[in-house]
């Protein structure tokens, strides 16, 4: 059974940093593309970014609002996905979900989802 | 930036057919995917690659796509189908960034 457990959320001041983690089990993590999706309170879903498997190059891509501030990384030896968030803004306040990405290159999509972890950016 | 457009709300009576649309310029070349999100829960994939249904999703959920519009159809909607529904696709840039529609609140009553 695929399990994704998100953690690391909390309260942080504007301009601060936070690192989220996602512990994965039940599938071959090293072969998986992974992504982060967020949801601001009372709002819709927003794709944050993804990381390819190392065998597919291990590259990352990001949505425009977070590019240059957020970094997605992975530790295949620990079956763990990370989201490093720097220069946080109040508009980054959201529940952050880790997801697996399925599909073919050019047509990947979030498949399995974690339970989410809440990040609140406030002074 | 690329956008997917959904109606904010759709309302049907139990047993009726609900249709939720999603429009986007790249949909003739890109698949659409649909997610159901109930209050306080993580989203669940209900349709992938325009019209395929994951295992465990009831047959009343179906999807189609034509031109710049994708449609999620719930035939014989039930009270438990009341939820927010989001379409998803990727942009046509070489980086294949993901994008969600704004979401549609389905009310069944």
Image (cartoon, coloured by chain):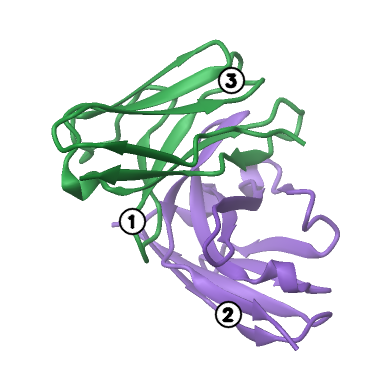
List x then y, in percent, for residue A68: 86, 59
x and y, in percent, of residue A13 in the image: 76, 86
Quarter of the image with the N terminus of chain A is bottom left
- The residue that mark 2 highlights is A9
| In the image: residue B78, left or right of residue A121 | left
How far across and down, in percent of the image, does residue B1 sit?
77, 36
Q: Which x, y percent locates residue A49?
A: 67, 51
Mark 2 and mark 1 residues within 8 Å of each other at the beta carbon: no
Q: Secondary structure at mark 1?
A: loop
The residue sitting at 59% across, 64% down in the picture is A40
Q: Nearer the viewer, residue A24 or B107?
A: B107
Same chain check for tags 2 and 1: no
- Residue assigned mark 3: B27
Q: Secondary structure at mark 3?
A: loop
Q: Residue at x 41, y 67 (%)?
A: A115
Q: Tell me: B86 left or right of A8.
A: left
The mark lying in front, picked from 3 and 2, is: 3
Chain with green colouring = B
What residue would you read off at disc 1?
B38
Q: CA distance from mark 2 to mark 1?
A: 22 Å
Q: Chain of mark 2?
A: A
Instruction: Identify which residue is drawn at 72% across, 33% down.
Output: B2
Total labels drawn: 3
- Of all chains, the one bearing label 3 is B
Separation of marks 3 and 2 at Cα, in angstroms: 35 Å
Whether B23 is drawn above or below B13: the answer is above
Q: For numbered disc 2, what is the local secondary structure?
A: loop
Q: In the figure, what tint was chain A given? A: purple
Query: Label 1 marks which chain's residue?
Result: B
């Amino acid at each position: 059974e695929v399990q994704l457990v998100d953690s690391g959320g909390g309260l942080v001041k504007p301009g601060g940093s936070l690192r989220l983690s996602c512990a994965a089990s039940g599938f071959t993590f090293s072969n998986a593309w992974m992504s982060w999706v967020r949801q601001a309170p009372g709002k819709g879903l927003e794709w944050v970014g993804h990381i390819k498997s190392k065998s597919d190059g291990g590259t990352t891509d990001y949505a425009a609002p977070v590019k240059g501030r957020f970094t997605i990384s992975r530790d295949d030896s620990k079956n763990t996905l990370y989201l490093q968030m720097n220069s946080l803004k109040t508009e980054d306040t959201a529940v952050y979900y880790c997801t697996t990405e399925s599909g073919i290159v050019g047509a990947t999509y979030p498949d399995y989802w974690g339970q989410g972890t809440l990040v609140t950016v406030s002074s | 930036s690329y956008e997917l457009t959904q109606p904010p709300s759709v309302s049907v009576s139990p047993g009726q057919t609900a249709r939720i649309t999603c429009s986007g310029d790249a949909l003739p070349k890109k698949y659409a995917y649909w997610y159901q999100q109930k209050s306080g829960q993580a989203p669940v994939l209900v349709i992938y690659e325009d019209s395929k249904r994951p295992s465990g999703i009831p047959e009343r959920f179906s999807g189609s796509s034509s031109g710049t519009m994708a449609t999620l159809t719930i035939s014989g909607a039930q009270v438990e189908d009341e939820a927010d529904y989001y379409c998803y696709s990727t942009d046509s840039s070489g980086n294949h960034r993901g994008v969600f529609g704004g979401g549609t609140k389905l009310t069944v009553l």
